[in-house]
Image (spheres, rainbow, N blue to C red):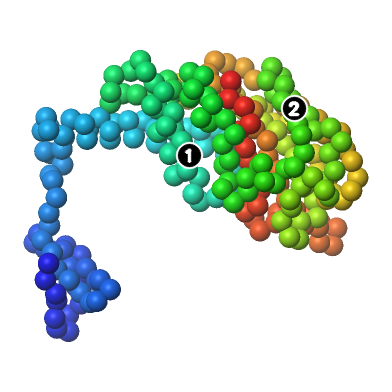
Amino acid sequence: MATLKGLIKIEGTLDGLTFYKGKNGYFIRTKGGISKNRINNDPAFIRTRENATEFGLAATSGKILRQSLAKLLHNTQDPTLPSCLMRKLMLIKNQDTTSPRGQRSPAVGLTTPEGKVLLQNFDCNENAILAQVLRADYTVNTTTGEISIPDFVPGTQLVAPPGATHVTLQSAFLNLDFTTEARDLQLSDPLNLSINLTPHNVTLAPAAVTGSGVTMILLQLSFFQKVNGAQYHLNNGAFNTLNILRVL
């Protein structure tokens, strides 16, 4: 590495030399690293190729799941979701004990009880963890996808963000085949409640899903602020929860 002195400030690569700006000025270094051709063909890098392939399978699975939940994720703002989901799917990939190394995938891992447990209770918004927001007991009917919250009092059983005046609860029933990308997403009717001390017997009942694949039951809480008779998403959904309650 060399230090660039003079009036000309260059950044980029030229004739095998990389010019870049560091904390203490401008520097030059030669282009290094291992060639792509060697990584793709050298037997010494077979593990690197296997890991890269499995990483790609996990990334694809994450994209498929996010696309399947697009209607709900539109109300849940967390830019870290792709990386958080990727870490989870890489763990689920390890539950694939039938595919050879280099071809293990979350799609197979999620067919196992261990893989399903790993995805269960996954929060799609790290800034709004369901267990920290909802302090009420609920039941989940794994056959119908129905979620029930008896005697729910929003004013005492929610840790609502400052400024929130209302909350909307909605459940989702998803059937997703990660291999064919066939999906069926059914949503319950949204239930909008004032955040006060009035008790409610909440029942969120989406329609039954069809098809083969992995079935998931989700719960979303969306917070609003009422201003002059109209409700507005609080901070563009930054405090909204979306949790995968069950994976079947």
Disc 1 on helix, strand or loop? helix
Q: In which quarter of the image is the C terminus?
A: top right
Q: Is residue 74 visible?
A: no
Residue at (28, 33) in percent of width and height: 51
Quarter the N terminus occupies: bottom left
Q: Which mark is drawn over residue 85?
A: 1
Tell me what residue is drawn at x 63 percent, y 40 percent: 242
Tell me how far mark 1 sits from mark 2, CA to CA. 25 Å
Percent x, y of residue 182: 51, 22
Nearest the eye: 12 or 2: 2
The answer to whether one can see residue 106 in this image is yes
Badge 1 or badge 2: first in the primary sequence: 1
Residue closer to the observer: 117 or 192 = 117
Image mark for residue 139: 2
The location of residue 177, given as percent across then percent down, is 50, 21
Q: Which amino acid does label 1 sit on?
A: Leu
| Up/down of 95 relative to 234, above or below | above
Going by the image, does 115 lie left or right of 165?
Answer: left
Question: Which mark is drawn over residue 217?
Answer: none
Quarter location, residue 105: top left
